[in-house]
Image (cartoon, grey):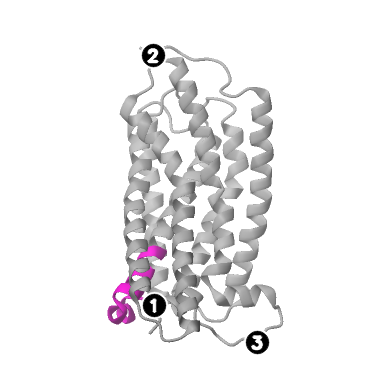
């Protein structure tokens, strides 16, 4: 039987640093995503595929940020209370919903660029909305299954047991590595098509370069924010933690990489400004005309 490990994972100065970081992240994330949601819902006329996906992404990021203080507070003890389960459940749903939506955006781009003729049938705001609804259902349902299995294996909350159970970590890994493979594949395919596409003038060449940089930037944000956390979880599953020293090391790594993944909420909001031209126009001019526009990624990725 594994021995019980007592004591704090971090010394007091580090707890203050994490606290300051979390407060800054919360304030900045709420402001940026609140602005994004306001613009998407009230400052834009035409619903595009990008607008549908990004609105859902802003909602997911806002929900994660709102649950963050309660989730962090629940980490102060090891009891598996209903409040702990609820706050951490909301946190996890929206983390993996963000991952799923980024994956959907990557697939949408891939279809638009790689299969432009079929894109007319496969891409529409209504179909994008249906995809978002399906993703919400799948993510919530998977978390319910994870919650039930977690209760059977010792507790659902992050610190309700000294060793994270196998099934809950497996759900996290499946919820990331499969989307990661899809995002990488779609991004590389899109970049390949854009680079190989002939340009007829300077403006078109610049639009292609901007679209390529946007795809690379989105991929980099996705990998930097989420890969370290899931590498730590992979190591946990592969090696196991049989000593207190190993558990403390894992807990520290998990704390750092989890906070890094939370930064994705702010980085997503920054990316909004580069993924839709109409977002930039609507957010900078409250008195601008109501002329509908195509999204920047749609314009850039469907160059002729």
Q: Position of residue 214 (x, y in %)?
A: 48, 65
Q: Which mark is residue 2?
A: 2
Q: CA distance from mark 2 to mark 3?
A: 66 Å
Q: Position of residue 223 (x, y in %)?
A: 44, 50
Along the line of sight, which residue is nearer the eye, 198 or 300?
Answer: 198
Q: Residue at x 48, y 42 (%)?
A: 89
From the viewer's perspective, tell me whether residue 110 is left or right of residue 13: left
Q: Which mark is residue 289?
A: 3
Image quarter of residue 237: top left
Instruction: Identify the secondary structure beneath mark 1.
Output: loop
> Mostly what secondary structure, the magenta segment?
helix
Along the line of sight, which residue is nearer the eye, 157 or 36?
Answer: 36
Q: Considering only order in the chain, which callout, 3 or 1, is on the residue closer to the N terminus? A: 1
Quarter holding the N terminus is top left
Residue range in magenta is 105-124
From the viewer's perspective, tell me whether residue 9 is left or right of residue 25: left
Q: Residue at x 44, y 73 (%)?
A: 49
Q: Considering only order in the chain, which callout, 2 or 1, is on the residue closer to the N terminus? A: 2
Crowd band around label 2 with a 10 angstrom C-alpha radius: few (<14), some (14–19), many (20+): few
Q: Magenta segment: does it hold 121?
A: yes
Q: Considering only order in the chain, which callout, 3 or 2, is on the residue closer to the N terminus? A: 2
Q: Position of residue 129 (x, y in %)?
A: 42, 69
Image quarter of residue 23: top right
User: In this view of the protein, can residue 181 be seen by the observer?
Assistant: yes
Say which residue label 1 marks.
Answer: 124
Q: CA distance from mark 1 to mark 3?
A: 24 Å
């Amino acid at each position: 039987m594994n021995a019980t490990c007592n004591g704090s994972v971090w010394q007091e100065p580090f707890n203050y640093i994490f606290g300051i970081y979390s407060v800054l992240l919360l304030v900045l994330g709420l402001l940026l995503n609140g602005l994004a949601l306001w613009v998407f819902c009230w400052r834009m006329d035409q619903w595009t595929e990008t607008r549908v996906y990004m609105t859902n992404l802003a909602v997911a990021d806002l929900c994660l940020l709102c649950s963050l203080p309660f989730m962090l507070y629940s980490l102060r003890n090891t009891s598996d209370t209903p409040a702990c389960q609820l706050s951490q459940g909301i946190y996890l749903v929206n983390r993996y919903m963000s991952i799923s939506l980024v994956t959907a955006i990557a697939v949408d781009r891939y279809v638009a660029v790689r299969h432009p003729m079929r894109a007319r049938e496969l891409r529409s705001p209504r179909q994008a909305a249906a995809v978002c609804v399906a993703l919400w259902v799948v993510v919530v349902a998977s978390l319910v299954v994870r919650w039930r299995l977690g209760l059977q294996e010792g507790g659902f909350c992050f610190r309700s047991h000294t060793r994270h159970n196998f099934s809950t970590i497996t759900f996290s890994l499946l919820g990331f590595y499969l989307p990661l493979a899809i995002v990488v594949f779609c991004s590389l395919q899109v970049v390949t098509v854009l680079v190989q596409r002939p340009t007829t003038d300077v403006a078109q060449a610049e639009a292609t370069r901007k679209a390529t940089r946007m795809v690379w930037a989105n991929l980099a944000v996705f990998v930097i924010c989420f890969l370290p956390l899931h590498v730590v979880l992979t190591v946990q599953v592969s090696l196991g933690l049989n000593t207190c020293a190993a558990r403390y090391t894992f807990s520290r790594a998990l704390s750092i990489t989890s906070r890094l993944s939370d930064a994705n909420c702010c980085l997503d909001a920054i990316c909004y400004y580069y993924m839709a031209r109409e977002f930039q126009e609507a957010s900078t001019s409250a008195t601008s005309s109501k002329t509908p526009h195509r999204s920047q990624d749609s314009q850039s990725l469907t160059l002729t």
